[in-house]
Image (tube, helix red, strand yellow):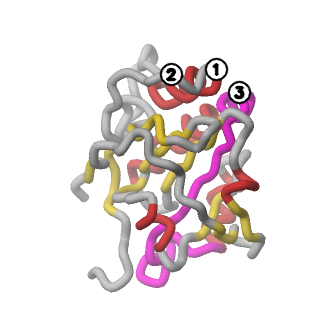
Amino acid sequence: MPGLETPGADLGALCPDFALPDPTGRVWTLSDLRGTNGLLVAFICNHCPYVKAMIDRFVADAKVLQGAGIGVVAIMPNDFTAYPADAPDRMADFARDHGFPFPYLVDESQAVAESFEAVCTPDFLGFDRYLTLKYRGRLDAGRKDPPPPDCPRELRDAMVAIARDPLTEPGTQHPSLGCSIKWKGEA
């Protein structure tokens, strides 16, 4: 399956408001999820090989970010009727199996993914404490293979800097690479 890269970011855009359920039906809102120093929104799914390759690194980085006052949320945007591996019951298993310390939400209508202009899984968007977009890029240089041991933690380092100073403008942001979102009505 060929990978799809995220487009360039409209840095400075405000975080779209949203309210989505987790697999148990609890609805989470933007105000529930934002941290005192910002918010990281990750569009992921269960079946994508790019997500599977990076998920444990992402969970580890999310814990660091939460410690820095950054709220973290993962959103599953795929059509789970066509891709049952991404269904809510399977999402709950995936989150438990990987020790998610953050909510994993279902975007069944796909409206939230559209409002964020998400295109692939994984797709990462980092917002400062004012909910202004500061980062859109990859987790790190790893794709389907583990990154080298000395690989910079691009997303984590950028978001920690933003948590310290919201005026920080992270340097080069490399696009994320992943599987295309499985939109309803597409075959």
Residue 68 lies, in percent from the top left, at 71, 27
- Amino acid tagged 1: Arg
The disc label shown at residue 164, or none: 1
Pointer 1 and pointer 2: residues touching (CB < 8 Å)?
Answer: yes
Separation of marks 1 and 2 at Cα, in angstroms: 8 Å
Q: In this figure, which residue is indicated by the disc labeled 3?
A: 68
Q: Would residue 71 appear left or right of 47 to someone viewing this image?
A: right
* Mark 1, other Cα within 10 Å: few <14 / some 14–19 / many ≥20: some
Q: Is residue 74 magenta?
A: yes
Q: Would residue 108 appear left or right of 96 to someone viewing this image?
A: left
The disc label shown at residue 168, or none: 2
- When asked about the image quadrant of residue 152, the answer is top left
Is disc 1 placed on a helix, strand or loop?
helix
* Mark 3, other Cα within 10 Å: few <14 / some 14–19 / many ≥20: some
Q: Residue at x 51, y 71 (%)?
A: 85
Looking at the image, residue 74 lies above or below residue 72: below
Mark earlier in primary sequence (1, 3)? 3
- Amino acid tagged 2: Thr
Pointer 1 and pointer 3: residues touching (CB < 8 Å)?
Answer: yes
Q: Is residue 181 magenta?
A: no
Which range of residues does the magenta coloring cover? Answer: 63-88
